[in-house]
Amino acid sequence: MMLSAFAILIFHLWVNLSYPMSRAEGFLTKTTYWGVDIFFFLSAYSIGGRKVEKYGSFILGRIKQVYVKYIIFAIIACIYAKWPLIRLFKVIFAVEFLEKGGGSFLWFLPGIMLVYIFLPIYQKLDIKNRKLTLLSAVAVWLLVAFLFTYCTKYHTLFIFWNRVPIILTGFYLGQSEKFKSLLNRKIARVLTGVGLLIIGYVLLYYFGYRPQLQTPIKDMFYLMAIPADLGIILLVGMIPEFKAIRWIGNATLEMYALQMIFGYRIMNILIKADINAMLINICTMIIIILPAIVFSFFYRKCLRVIGFEK
């Protein structure tokens, strides 16, 4: 979760260390959209690894943990950027997400809520008939992707729709005993992780960077990151967790929201200060991360005070 947050932060706010930007730096910083993939994967993995018994309670919990924060940050953005009220309502009720996809305010949060809403339902169908459910899911994904690619000009939701394969991958690996066994075998885990990472970055370089693959479906390049996603998850998951990692991991959504509301303003102020590019990047990250951790801490504390969380 922490790595996912950093990757998204780098993708949006990284100031080039080299000028003109080197190919290596551009490649490494402009393909960190895999940070979003990892978040989707982990969310689906957590659902796949258990059976959601009480759907209502599960959704209520996700609303408290995700959508209430989304509403709070939408209100903050509305005040800060002086939105018209109609935009605030369109954002809160995800109308803007449907209209603009990746161009909408914090599109990722309505996207992750869709995962939480539909994946437990998918799980119930999967329990009854796994092969049919999986084949149906893949068929629906492909059908919609092809229809939207060739029959309409409505391409904005591909930023979410083309994450369906990594969501399904996370869901099924969450159930896989072989995958869980791999996680417990260090040498096999490292070798598999390194192999997937190499394959993934080769695919990203040739199809996910310049150019970005657009056939046979629009924004196909997002799928090129899947091997790298899995390799990163296998390798980074071996790092021992300590408090700082847990704090940042718990504040992932807050980091995403704050960088999208204030990040560019902060970055531009630091650029005008005419300081070293690396120092700009470090300061930008600190200025985003610390308030995100503080917000996350007090938000959880408020939920406990009003009895919504133990």
Image (cartoon, rainbow, N blue to C red):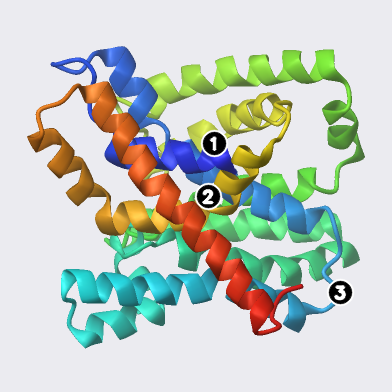
Is 245 placed above or below 88 here? above
Kindly identify the amino acid type of the residue bearing the numbered disc 1: Leu
Residue 53's disc is 3
- Relative image position of residue 192 (x, y in whole percent): 73, 18
The label nearer to you, 2 versus 1, is: 1
Which part of the image, by quadrant, shows the N terminus?
A: top right
Asked if residue 60 is positioned above or below residue 268 in the image, the reply reads below
Question: Which residue is more in the foreground, 300 or 228?
Answer: 300
Q: Which residue is mark 2?
A: 163
Q: Tell me if mark 2 has few (under 14), some (14-19) or many (20+) residues whose alpha carbon lies within 10 angstroms of its own.
A: some
Looking at the picture, which amino acid does disc 3 mark? Glu
Tell me how far mark 2 sits from mark 1, CA to CA.
18 Å
Label 1 crowd (10 A; few <14 / some 14-19 / many >=20): some
Q: Is residue 165 visible?
A: no
**Disc 3 element:** loop
Identify the residue position indicated by label 1 in the image. 3
Residue 195 locus on image (x, y percent): 66, 15
